[in-house]
Amino acid sequence: MNAFIKKSLFFIIPFLAWGIIVFVVDPFNYFNKSNLISNKAKINAENLNTLLFRTIDFVNYPSKNILIGDSRTDALPIDLIEKYSNQNFQKLNTNATKLNEILDLFYFSNKIKKIETVVIGINFSMFNQFSYENRVNNVIKIIENPFLYVFNKDIFEACFYVLRSFLFEINLDSKPLLNKEDFWHWTVNVKSNHWYGRYKFPEELLSELIEFDEFTKKNNINVIIINVPHHVDFHDKLISNNLKMEEIKFKNILSSLNAKVYDFDYLNEITNNKINFKDPIHYNDSIGNLMVREIWGNNLKFGKKL
């Protein structure tokens, strides 16, 4: 019996030790009990898995007003939105978010707390049958099961980077390896092919979007959809892939929704000027401020209401 107990302890102790480490480091604030590691160090976990980090943050501190999208939406200044609206907002955006994931995040958030306003950043590049992922369901499974959180390779990796930052002040570097000009050309010539080189009209996604529109109308949820701008260099690749008519169809669909829809992605002084962009698909902070001032300040100049 003693030999069995010793063998059992020998087997169990490493798992218990790892559980304690995860509980104390808690890179994504899942348990939200330990204050040993600073939030400054945990930025590394957010950069590693933004979706998991911000979804857990919403669970910990739910808000009735949310902003959902990908990195293109992240540039919208939430403090300025809050200033104009006199309401608190929570960001739920993450890198490379797909439109189906945006809808999944909305429904999950609405179960946690009744949503009053949802702001969605969108672009035609998301409206493609081949633009689909299912990461939100995996995140929900982790949130609902602490064992999946503790014994997860992403958590293991995040613990390493968070501890490294905490102990040695070494952070993850998310900057592109290429210089700005080379990265610009790579985005235009390579990334555009990933997005526009293979296209099929997303019938199922359209059904999900219409269902979302009907749900929000029925439940008196204010929806603001922003068609975020791309530089003309990138938009030209859409045209060269013979997708202009599909983009028009996409905008017509948006205009048919009950939501308030604002379009910034057309040929104008913003999209025609390279100085307004960090890269061909990411507008800079000044344009983010401009978009918020136009929409929430009810003073449209470049934005068009669809």
Image (cartoon, helix red, strand yellow):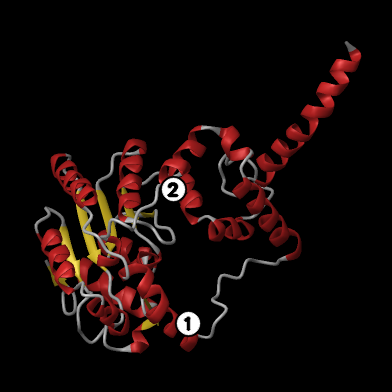
Residue 301, quarter of picture? bottom left
Does the CB distance between marks 2 and 1 fall below 8 Å? Answer: no
Between marks 2 and 1, how big is the CA–CA gap?
27 Å
Residue 190, quarter of picture? bottom left
> In the rendered image, which residue does mark 1 sit on?
183
Residue 10: x and y, percent? 84, 28
- Residue at image coords 30%, 64%: 81
Mark 2 or mark 1, earlier in chain: 2
Q: Which mark is residue 135?
A: 2
145 on left or right of 97: right
Quadrant that contains the C terminus: bottom left
**Residue 298 visible in the current orientation:** no
Residue 98: x and y, percent? 35, 56
Quadrant that contains the N terminus: top right
160 on left or right of 123: right
Specify the amino acid type for callout 1: Phe
Specify the amino acid type for callout 2: Arg
105 on left or right of 225: right
Q: Nearer the viewer, residue 199 or 254?
A: 199
Mark 1: few/some/many CA within 10 Å (<14, 14-19, 20+): some
**Residue 273 visible in the current orientation:** yes
Q: Nearer the viewer, residue 102 or 55?
A: 102
Give the answer, above or below, for where 46 lies relative to 218. Answer: below
Callout 2 secondary element: helix
Q: Residue furthest right?
A: 3
- Residue at image coords 33%, 36%: 111
Residue 69, quarter of picture? bottom left
